[in-house]
Image (cartoon, coloured by chain):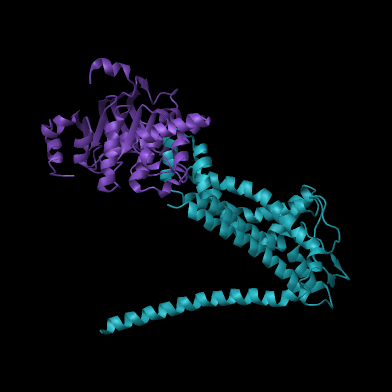
Chain colours: A purple, B cyan
Amino acid sequence: MTESREQNVTGVFELENVSVTYGSEVAIAGVSMHIPPRAVTALIGPSGCGKSTLLRCLNRMNDEIGSAKVRGRITLDGADIYAKEMDPVELRTRVGQVFQKPNPFPMTIYDNVAYGPRTQGTRRRSELDEVVERSLKRAALWGEVKKDLKKHAFELSGGQQQRLCIARALATQPEVVLMDEPASSLDPISTQQVEDTIAELKEYVTIVIVTHNMQQAARISDLTAFMLRESMEEPAQLVEVGETRVMFTNPGDKRTEAYITGRFG
Amino acid sequence: MSRRIRQARLTQTLAVAITGAAAAFIVTAALFLLGYILVRGLPAMSWEFISQPPRGQMKAGGILPSIIGTLALTSGTAAFALPVGVAAGIYLSEYAPRGRMTRIIRLAISNMAGVPSIVYGLFGLALFVILFSFGTSILAGALTLACLTLPVIITATEEALRQIPSDLRQASLALGATRWRTIYRVVLPAAAPGIVTGSILGLARAAGETAPILFTAAVYYKRQLPTSIFDDVMVLPYHIYILATQVTGRPDDIIWGTALILVGGVTAGSVIAATWRSLQRKKVRW
């Protein structure tokens, strides 16, 4: 990825000394990193190391949990997302999220994908049709569902539901899509399909994915960030971040190496 | 077989027998109750019985004013209790911060549910009939019954909303929807079956209440049908009471006939709610 290309595209996150506290407990401390656009950045680390918490900082979903407090500075395309004039509701149309378990709404496939655009005020049928088709195509689900868009979303298989959730997130035309272990509840074939989808998606959006599956991180990500909470008394920290290829073949930190080679976690 | 296992088996058999007997008793009691009302009430059924006002010192004729009165009161109760109850349920489940104030609200609601219905009657008399000068009227009665039904509807709404997985709320918020839009477009539709069933059960109970309307809406005898919400009305439960205690020399079957109409109406409401709910269940499932 060249510098000039990076300047023209949106969806760049910059984290400076980010920490998160729940009440008096410091969950994450001092995370600084650059998340490049149109690439897949994986957050890896053992359970409870703050990966998901850090992810939820990026679309301010932590705001919905009363006691969480985020310090430091997080910018999206140069703008501080925790600034007063930044509306979290608007931010979330630019930074979508796909959850661990497929969570389609109890409505038709079409209405699921159209939910975001309708929320933003799109009413024209032709416009909605277009965005639904494009989003489903990008999520690699169009071929399987184009004949039954009026079908209830719960009639889809788990893997299809998850790709529907990806399509739903894409429909607001976000710059970034956050994924919190999106394949952890899926069977291997569905997992493969979701991974393939992710690989194609990075053409359009920045992807930040939390995974505890290291093979998955190695397969799909361009950049890997390794997080670790060394003991319950200490907050979780970012151990290192680098190109996935390098991280998995020649990690800079002993702890990364130990984790990747399966000595703990 | 060891002694311990033999004993465990015996206990198990006993447990099945005792719990099963209790269940069988309930079914028998319900069937007997409904069957008895049916057998005693059916002879009174005629077109005149449901389409005419009483005549001959209420010993003959029909019960139309009471049917209309109960329908009017129950609709009025629904009109007041449903919007307030559902809104309060939404607030408690979706917005209320966890704290002292919320605990106090919850405590107030469960206390409301525990107040005897005659006390609601007195309260309605003091507040709606006298203070607000609504008089003995459909309006005063409906407001009193609404107070009685509110805790049921609030609790049903809150319970139904809590059943909705938080995943769905998160998904909607993450798509840039406000909390209200999330509630209105995702959570409420999914919870609607539970809310409707709970509410209809609450309203059915209100339809059969006598004490709260004794001082606030009910009238002993009135041939004319109500024309405004400020009219007092005859109502089925009160009419049963009057027939049973105040009218001498009346044929017994008109009491049971009136009871049959009341129970039939309430049962019809519950059956409609249950059917609608199971239809919704087929559409919505997690």
Left or right side of A246 for A154: right
The residue positioned farthest toward the top in the image shown: A4
Quadrant that contains the C terminus of chain A: top left
Residue at screen point 45% across, 34% down: A116
Image vertical order of residue B223 relative to residue A147, above or below = below
Instruction: Find residue B164 and report its horizontal and vertical position in percent.
Output: 46, 49
Instruction: Find residue B29 and report its horizontal and vertical position in percent.
Output: 59, 76
Instruction: Find residue A221 and report its horizontal and vertical position in percent.
Output: 23, 33
Res A238 quadrant in image: top left
Res B28 quadrant in image: bottom right
Closest to the observer: A23 or A165? Answer: A165
Left or right side of B6 for B156: right
Residue at screen point 62% across, 46% down: B84
Instruction: Find residue B196 and report its horizontal and vertical position in percent.
Output: 58, 53
Camera sees residue B280: yes
Residue at screen point 11% across, 35% down: A254
Camera sees residue A28: no
The residue positioned farthest toward the right in the image shown: B56
Closest to the observer: B169 or A105? Answer: A105
Residue at screen point 81% across, 56% down: B232
The tally of labels here is 0
The residue positioned farthest toward the front in the image shown: A147
Image vertical order of residue A240 relative to residue A145, above or below = above
Left or right side of A232 for A114: right
Quadrant that contains the N terminus of chain A: top left
